[in-house]
Amino acid sequence: MGGLLQPTPTVAERDNSKRTILIAIAAVMLLAGIAALVLRPKPKAVAVPPPYAADLKFSDVKLSQAQNFVGATVTYVDGTLSNTGSKSVTDATVRVTFKDPYGQIAQVEEVPIKILRTSGPYPDTANLSVAPLAAGQSQTFRLTFEHVSDQWNQGQPDLQIIAITTK
């Protein structure tokens, strides 16, 4: 009589959960790798100074700071820009690199060079397009910075001309 009460044999199912988890992890890693390749920033090309930059010379560079009307500190870089070339310069942009006490880059700014004009009651700046720098001529310039990083070592920044327009 024991035959009627015995359970019928069943086929055991294979456990596929481990394989499913491994496939899901591999798919996520593959998608993350593809996203990292697609979204990574493009390397910046090293900017080569324009050829005429060799004909522009900075000299007598001085730093100064002043408080503006809202109490913030404004930093000025003043100096003399000399054009030793054969063309008139109507626009120039300079890359100014401020360094920290360890010689590392604290801040980089790209600003147009402005000629300092003292013909009125107070010094004012003008674009080179208004007062071009003729061949063989020198002019006083001023670069103005509303904010400079707190990590700046208060030393003279590096100046590199990165763009020039001549006529």
Image: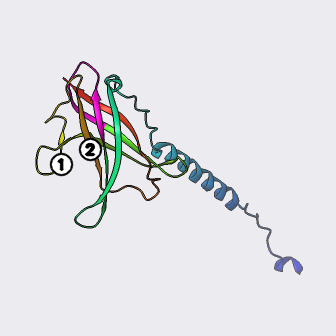
Q: Quadrant of the C terminus?
A: top left
Quarter assignment of residue 10:
bottom right
Q: Quadrant of the N terminus?
A: bottom right
- Asked whether, in this view, residue 74 is left or right of residue 129, the answer is right
Choose mark 1 or mark 2, whichever is in front. 1
Kind of residue at disc 1: Pro
Q: Residue 153 placed where, x, y %? A: 47, 53
Q: Residue 75 placed where, x, y %? A: 32, 53
Magenta segment includes 19: no
User: Which range is magenta?
Assistant: 79-93
- Asked whether, in this view, residue 57 is left or right of residue 167, the answer is right
Q: Is residue 14 above or below residue 105?
A: below
Q: Which mark is residue 1?
A: none
Identified at 22% across, 65% down, the residue is: 69
Label 2 near label 1: C-beta < 8 Å? yes
Q: Which mark is residue 142?
A: 2
Asked which colour scheme the image uses, the reply is: rainbow
Magenta segment includes 90: yes
Instruction: Kindly identify which residue carries mark 1.
Output: 123
- Disc 1, SS: loop
Main SS class of the magenta portion in the image: strand
Q: Is residue 81 above or below residue 11?
A: above
Kind of residue at disc 2: Arg
- Residue at the far top: name it: 86
Q: Residue 115 placed where, x, y %? A: 21, 39
Quarter assignment of residue 14:
bottom right
Identified at 64% across, 57% down, the residue is: 20
> Which one is nearer the viewer's eye here, 51 or 11?
51
Q: CA distance from mark 1 to mark 2?
A: 10 Å
- Residue at the far right: name it: 1
Q: Residue 16 placed where, x, y %? A: 69, 59
